[in-house]
Amino acid sequence: MDQNEPKQLAIVSGKGGTGKTTIAAAFASLAKNKVMVDCDVDAADLHLLLQPKIVTQDKYFGGRSPHVDLDLCTQCGLCTKVCRFNAIDNGVVDPVSCEGCGFCFHICPESAITMEEAFSGDWYISDTSYGPFIHARLGIGEENSGKLVTVVRKKAVEIAKEKNLGLILIDGPPGIGCPVTASLTGVNLILAVTEPTLSGIHDLERILKLTEHFKIPSMVCINKFDINLENSQQIISYCDKNGSKLVGRIPYEPKVVEALVNRKTVMDHPCNEVQGIVQKMWEEVESVLRQKA
């Protein structure tokens, strides 16, 4: 890898609600010389803590939808017959049911159907007190979020190079699907945030298997580790066995919730014990990133 390329850290979780965005926002307040990216475009919420001021806004066209020229349509019913989603009835398209597969376009004997780009959401370049921030909002019920993730990540790389910023801090989406894959491709290090619940353990194992597949080094943080010490020990044992370094154990702390309610990061609100743990986590993560060639 080019030494001048910005390092990329992705903070991910196998499931939602583990505290991933809380950690990402805390790192945003600690890291220097960086650009932040919220890749959870389906349910973006990092902006709630970073309180950005939008500089530019662009529309995102991520899919295609059929448009019927009713002057050419003979209402032969062929499109209705072949559509497995029941999304078109004699030339009248139901946009909610349509999956944009294009079968009707290919089958129409009168060439009355064209596939047009569909507006899927917006993406933004913003300023925050922590640095530049790239984020997006996918439209309700829209798909192709993996493509939108790629768009915001590319823009983050452009801005990092333009402003000579050394780090891209990515708040990734939960799960292991297409948006997650788009968030992880090409990153230098992954921090997986989990919680000591059965679902948390199961989904941590899934996300770590995904990082292993892509050969990306991973670290793990257990959030609210003290709500179930037995499950926390199971996570620790799994990390030891599979070579993922445990970088932090954060206790349950009501003041963290207070910080979020007040739209502040845990580093900007009185959460002394948690602040010290997160500070040490960031120092260790930063040290590993510096070693990446």
Image: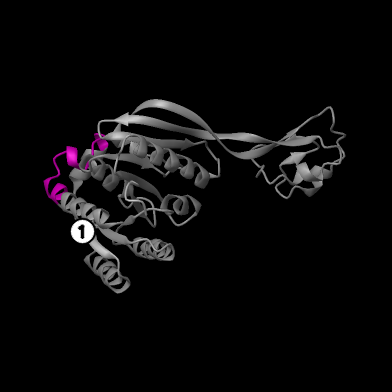
Left or right of residue 250, residue 120 in this image: right
Left or right of residue 48, residue 113 in this image: right
- Confirm whether residue 61 shows in the render: yes
- Confirm whether residue 223 shows in the render: no
Q: Identify the residue at horizontal 35%, vertical 39% (top origin).
A: 160
Instruction: Please state the horizontal and vertical placement of residue 182, each as a whole percent of the image.
Output: 47, 50
Instruction: Locate the N terminus and report the quarter of the image it occupies.
Output: bottom left
Q: Is residue 286 above or below residue 123?
A: below
Left or right of residue 253, residue 71 in this image: right
Instruction: Magenta stretch: give its range.
Output: 261-276
Mark 1: few/some/many CA within 10 Å (<14, 14-19, 20+)? many
Q: Nearer the viewer, residue 138 or 287?
A: 287
Instruction: Please state the horizontal and vertical placement of residue 175, each as a whole percent of the image.
Output: 43, 55
Return the residue at label 1.
249
Amino acid carrying label 1: it is Arg
Instruction: Locate the C terminus and report the quarter of the image it occupies.
Output: bottom left
